[in-house]
């Protein structure tokens, strides 16, 4: 089954296309597969950041989630840019992903975002980040 995770045979492009599938389950599955692939293949991060900039709304949302799940700090600039996406759902998911990446400076800036939902997601992501950090005695 490892052959399914091999990005050299075009599988990455197959899953990238899946981010825009009409069925929600197919989109979630594609994002999960890309998250698994990306842990060993930096080309996945590159492909996901391209989708985040140029994909359909649905694909941009899923790309933001996948980038957060990957834990790739190289995705932070693209996710910061996605905070300004015209679609609130994309911007909220970018804030969530920044939280997964521990990008606290970007989240603190997002607290000034003009959209209440994006500010709220940034605040929640910061709160989660604070919970994961050991407290001083």
Image: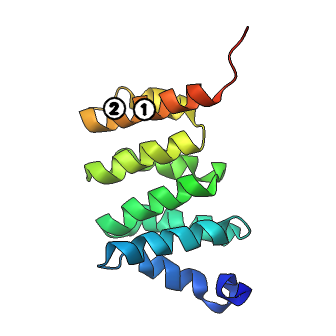
How far apart, in angstroms, are the residues tagged by discs 1 and 2?
6 Å
Quarter of the image for residue 122 reads top left
Q: Is residue 115 visible?
A: no
Query: Horizontal and vertical percent for residue 130?
Result: 57, 25
* Image quadrant containing the C terminus: top right
Identified at 69% across, 87% down, the residue is 8
Query: Horizontal and vertical percent for residue 87?
Result: 26, 53
Q: Which residue is the site of mark 2? A: 120
Q: In this rendering, is residue 92 above or below 123?
A: below
Identified at 30% across, 52% down, the residue is 89
Numbered label attached to residue 60: none
* Image quadrant containing the N terminus: bottom right
How packed mark 1 is, by other alpha carbons closer than 10 Å (few <14, some 14-19, many 20 or more), is some
Asked if residue 33 lies left or right of residue 20, the reply is: right
Asked if residue 5 lies left or right of residue 52, the reply is: right
Q: In this rendering, is residue 13 above or below 88?
A: below
Total numbered badges shown on the rendered structure: 2
Q: Is residue 6 visible?
A: yes
Asked if residue 69 lies left or right of residue 91, the reply is: right
Query: Horizontal and vertical percent for residue 101?
Result: 60, 44
How packed mark 2 is, by other alpha carbons closer than 10 Å (few <14, some 14-19, many 20 or more), is some
Identified at 44% across, 81% down, the residue is 17
Q: In this rendering, is residue 42 above or below 21?
A: above
Quarter of the image for residue 105 reads top right
Q: Are marks 1 and 2 in contact (CB under 8 Å)?
A: yes
Foreground residue among 34 and 73: 34
Identified at 32% across, 67% down, the residue is 58
Which color scheme did the rendering employ for the protein? rainbow
Q: Which residue is the site of mark 1? A: 124
Q: Secondary structure at mark 2?
A: helix
């Amino acid at each position: 089954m490892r052959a399914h995770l091999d990005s050299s045979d075009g599988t990455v492009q197959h899953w990238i296309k899946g981010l825009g599938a009409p069925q929600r389950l197919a989109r979630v599955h594609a994002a999960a597969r890309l998250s698994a692939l990306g842990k060993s293949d930096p080309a996945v991060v590159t492909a996901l950041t391209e989708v985040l900039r140029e994909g359909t709304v649905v694909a941009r949302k899923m790309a933001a989630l996948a980038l957060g799940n990957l834990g790739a700090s190289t995705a932070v600039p693209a996710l910061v840019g996605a905070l300004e996406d015209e679609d609130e759902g994309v911007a909220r998911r970018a804030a969530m992903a920044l939280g997964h990446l521990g990008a606290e400076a970007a989240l603190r800036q997002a607290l000034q975002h003009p959209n209440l939902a994006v500010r709220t997601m940034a605040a929640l992501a910061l709160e989660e980040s604070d919970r994961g950090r050991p407290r001083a005695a």
